Image (cartoon, rainbow, N blue to C red):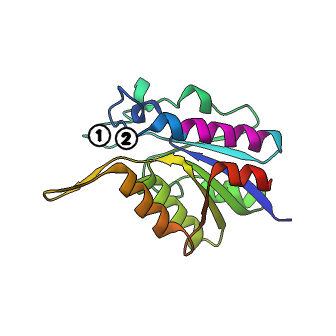
Amino acid sequence: MSQRVFIVIDVQNDYFPGGAMALHEPEVAAERAHQALEHARRTHLPCIVIQHVADKPGATFFKPGTRGADLHPDFSPRSDERHLIKHYPNAFRETALEATLRRLGAEEIVIVGMMTHMCIDTTVRAASDLGYRVTVLGDATATRALRFGTETTPAPMVQTAYLAALHGSFARVITSAQWMAEE
């Protein structure tokens, strides 16, 4: 069996109610992601927790040193887990993620986290391009409504569209319950 690695992306305070970039139903996604993370820990999968810190001028959320940039308390990495900081949506860009996965002998990665249409999407596509088999636990991700011109696409439609675009070509998208039943 190939080595499987569990990755949590950007489950941070700014994405929750009262945060600078609150998402649609982040609590539901976070609960499912936390259940999956605990399952990964119980089954001894290596876990990597990724945190976005916006270090560019004019950033509106994930500002360094703010409570909003902090990881949600349920996702603090344990001492035996890797914690990586990123500054771009793609978790591979200018981070140690790829080197860490290579050291772990990873062939498959399982991804949960936030924001589906941005950091999840770009990281999944990059992982696929790098040759990893990727599973996204779709119900353990969250996004927000998007506006283009005069049109607004509601968050549930954005979520469905992005997960559908990833499924098949870049990843296998399943529910957290399905994944936990497989392990």
Using the image, determine if residue 1 lies above or below residue 6: below
In terms of depth relative to the viewer, which is nearer, 42 or 104? 42
As drawn, which residue projects farthest toward the bottom? 169
In 3D space, how far apart are the residues under numbered discs 2 and 1 (Cα atoms)? 7 Å
Packing grade of label 1 (10 A; few <14, some 14-19, many >=20) is few
Secondary structure found at label 2: loop
Magenta span: 30-41
Tell me if 177 is positioned left or right of 45 in this view.
left
Front-lying residue, 101 or 28: 28
Whether 106 is drawn above or below 33: the answer is: below
Residue 59's label in the rendered image is 1
Q: Residue furthest left?
A: 150
Crowd tier of the residue under label 2, counting other residues whose Cα lies within 10 Å: few below 14, some 14–19, many 20 or above: few
Where is mark 2, residue-wise?
55
Quarter of the figure with residue 132: bottom right
Q: Are marks 2 and 1 in contact (CB under 8 Å)?
A: yes
Residue 68 placement (x, y as % from top left): 41, 28
Q: Nearer the viewer, residue 86 or 21?
A: 21
Q: Residue at x 46, y 69 (%)?
A: 165
Characterize the magenta stretch by its predominant secondary structure.
helix
Q: Residue at x 78, y 56 (%)?
A: 182
Q: Residue at 40% across / 32% down in the picture?
A: 14
Residue type at mark 1 is: Ala
Q: Secondary structure at mark 1?
A: loop
* Left or right of 148 in this view: 116: right
Q: Is residue 65 visible?
A: no
From the image, which quarter does the N terminus lie in? bottom right
Image coords of residue 53 (percent x, y):
43, 39
Using the image, tell me which numbered label, if any, was put on residue 32.
none
Residue type for callout 2: Asp
Where's residue 121, x and y in %? 47, 60
Residue 129 x, y percent position in the rendering: 56, 73
